[in-house]
Image: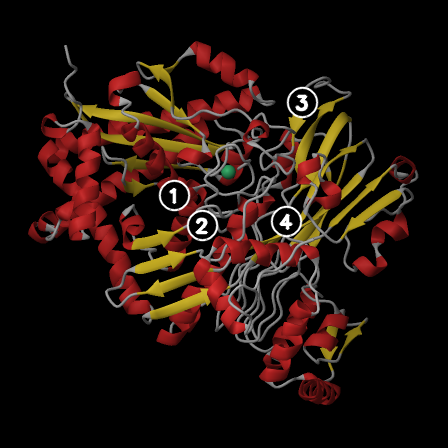
Amino acid sequence: MLKKPIGWDGKTLMEMLNESEKFIKETKHYYGIDKLALKEKDPFNYERAYASLRGALVSSRETALHISASPIVKEIGELCFALYTPEGDSIVVSTGILVHVHTMSEAIKFMIRENYEDDPGINPGEVFLNNDPQEGNVHTTDVQTIIPIFWRDELIGWAGGVTHQIDAGGITPGHDLVAAVSRFDDGAYYTCRKIGSNDKIWKDHMINAKRAVRTPMYWELDEKCRLAGDLMIRDALFDFIEREGIDYYKRFIREAIEEGRRIVQERVKERLIPGRYRAASFFDVPFKEEAWQPRAKMDKITNEPIEIIVKEDGTLFLTFDGASGPGPNPMNCGIGAMEGGQWVLLTQILIYGDKVNDGAYFAVEKEYPKGTWCNPGDPYLSYQSPWGNLIPAYTGMMKAISYGLFSRGYREEVVPGYGFTGDAIQGGGIYSSGPLKGERWMLSTFEISGQGLGASAVKDGLDWGYAMWNPESDLGDVETWELFQGGIPYLARKIKPNTAGHGKYRGGANYAGIAMIAYSKDVDFFGAREGLVFHGAGGMHGGYPHATGYRLYAKNTNMKEIIENQKEYPLWDPDPEHGEFEKLLKGEIVRKAHCSIYPVLLENYDLVHFAMSGGPGYGDPLERKLELIKKDLDDGIYSNDKILSIYGVVANYDEIKGEWIIDEKATETRKNELRNERKEKSLPFNEYWENEKKKITEDKLSEPVKRMYSESLNLSIKWAKEFREFWKFPEDFQMEVK
Ligand code: MN
C-alpha cells in the first residue's frame, strides 16, 4: 500500500516544492502572493504573530545555549536557529551566527528532492543531521540538526539549529583546517542523515559520531544543545497554532516570506541607485613551501571579482563572473557557503529590519560560475576552510553597495569592508602532566569574532568588535578560552599598533596576543589569514586598506630560564622590524610574511603571536583631524613613524604629561611636503596604463598572479573579453604560466 503523502492537501513534499518554485518563477512573488491579506486585514495581529515566533526562536537559542554547549558556542554564541516552511524556506530566525540560516534551507530542499519522504521516510519525532558543504552547509565544522514538525498528519514546517564545532575529525586537530586538500581530509561527513526518532538521538549514531572527532564530549553537548532548541521551537509553534489556528499559520508563513522579499526590494529602491557596481578582491594561498602533499605545493592568489546590478524594480543581480579556479586547498566554497555569506551581510547592510527570512534570498538573483572557486562542482575537493575565500570575496559586496549608499547620500551607512575574521590560532595537543594528563585539548579561541570594521564616510570604524558572519560579535574572555585550552596559556593581550587602515576616518583597530605552550605534548599549531595581498577591496575614496597578517612564533626558547629568573619576556610585537622576540628571547624565531601556515609541532615553552585584523579606512589621511590623530597616538592605535609618513603629522611625546603633543607648525610644513611628493610621483592615466601593461607584456608578473589571471581568462568568456579590451590585447590573448 502506498503511504499517504505528508504535504498539504494530499500533496507530497516534492509536489509542494515544485509548486513553490513554479510560483516564484512565474509570478516573481513568493507562492504567487499578490496581496498581504492577513497584514492588511489586521496588521496588529500579524505583527504580534511574527514577533511571537521570533521571540520563541530567540529564547530557544538562549535556553539551549545554557543547557549544554561547547566553549565556542557558549562563550560567543556560535549557534542559531530557524523555522522553515514545509518546502524549506526560512520564515523567522533567531539571533546568532546568521550565516547559517539559508544554508539549512538548502539541506531541507536536498532531502525533499531526494524524496526522503519515501525513503528513509520523514515522520514525527525524527531527527536529521547534516554537515555536508555540497548540500547546504559552509564546512564540515558546522553541524546542523533539523527536525520535521507535524500538525495532525501534515508536515507544517521544520526547525533547524546549527553550531560550529571545535574539531570535526579532519586531517589535523582544529576547526578551520589548513592542511585539508580533499573531501577525505575534511573530517566526518553527515549528508542529511537520519539520526534519531521519538525526539531522541539514536545511541549507535552517538557512539559513531563521538569516535569520529577528537572532542567527543563537546560533540555530544552540541548535539543535545541543537536538538533541545529545535524541540523548544516545535513546542512554541504548537502554542502558536493553538492560538491562531492552523489556517492562519499556513497563510501567515507565505505572507511573511513574501513581505521579507518586498522589504529588500523597497530598501534597495530607497537606498541605492540603479546601475552596475563592481569591486575587486583577492586572497593568497601560499602553499608552495607550506604544503605536505605534493599536488598542493603551489602558490596561488584567488581572483574574487564581484559585480552587482541594481535594477530599477529594486531587485539585485550578483555575479562572481571572472572568478579564478578552485585548488588543492581547503578554501573552496560550495553554494551553501556563498549563499550564507551573502545572506548574513545583506541582513547587516540592507535588510536589518525585523522580517529577516528567505524573502531576501528570493529578492537576489545570483550567479556563481561553474568550475570556479565559488562553485567548483567537485564534491571530492576540500571545503574545510571556505572562509579563506568567502571573507575577502564579500568585502567587495560591502564596498559595491557602499558606492550606492554614498550616491544616495547615506554617508553614515558606507562601509568599505571589514577586517579578516581569521587567524584563530588553531590546533591542539595532549596534557603531559597535571590532573588532566593524557586528555586532549583543542584550541578553541574564537577571538576572531572581534575584528575591526571599516570606516564610514562620517566616522572611524568600530575597533575589535565586528565579525562578518555573526552580527552579535564578541571576542570572548581569555579566562574562558584558557579553561578549555589549558595547554596554551596567554602571556599577553595588547593593542597592536598600525592594524587600522589609514584615512580621514580610520578603520577599526585591533590587538594581538601572545601565548605559551605548557604542560603538553604533541602540539599541532597552525592558522590562516591573508598575508601577501590586501584582502578585500581595501579602503574607499582615498582610504587605505588595513594591515595584512603575518606569522610569528618561537621554538626551543629559553622561557623556562626567563620564568625561573623572573626576567622580561615579549608581550607584543609592536614593530616587526625591531622585534621583541628577537630582543628578549633565545631560540629559533620564525617570521613569515604570509599568514596561512600548515601545522607545525610545538613543545612546552614555545611561544606564538597572533594578531587580529583592523578594518579599511575612508578618505584622504591628510584630512584627518589633528585631535583624532593625537588620540590615536595616546591610545597606541598608530606609531609615531606612521603618523609622520602617512598623515604628515609631527608629534612629540611629553614624558612629564605622559601624552603626545602635536607640533602644528611643523605639521603644516610636513603636509605640504607630502602634497608636493604626491604631485611629483603622480602620473597621467595613459602613462600609468602603459607602465602597468608592460608588466604583462614584459613578463614581470609573479607566477601566482599569472596563474590567477590565466584561470580567470579561461573560465569566463565575458570577463576575458573585458580584460583583453581594457588592455588592448588581441582576441586570443592568454596569460602563460610556465
Ligand atoms: Mn563554522
Name the residue carrying label 4: 529
Q: Is mark 2 within 8 Å of ligand 1?
A: no
Q: Are marks 2 and 1 in contact (CB under 8 Å)?
A: yes
Q: Residue furthest left?
A: 41
Work out how far the residue at label 1 is from the one at label 4, CA to CA, in angstroms.
Answer: 27 Å
Residue marked by disc 2: 471
The amino acid type of the residue labelled 3 equals: Arg
Q: Amino acid at mark 4?
A: Arg
Residue 458 in the image: above or below residue 572: below
In percent of width and height, residue 600 lies at: 76, 35
* Image vertical order of residue 5 relative to residue 314, above or below: above
Instruction: Tell me the residue at 25%/62% (across/down).
Output: 266
User: What kind of element bears circle 4?
Assistant: loop
Q: Gap in Å between the C-alphas at discs 3 and 4?
A: 26 Å
Q: Residue at x 30, y 64 (%)?
A: 268
Label drawn at residue 95: 1
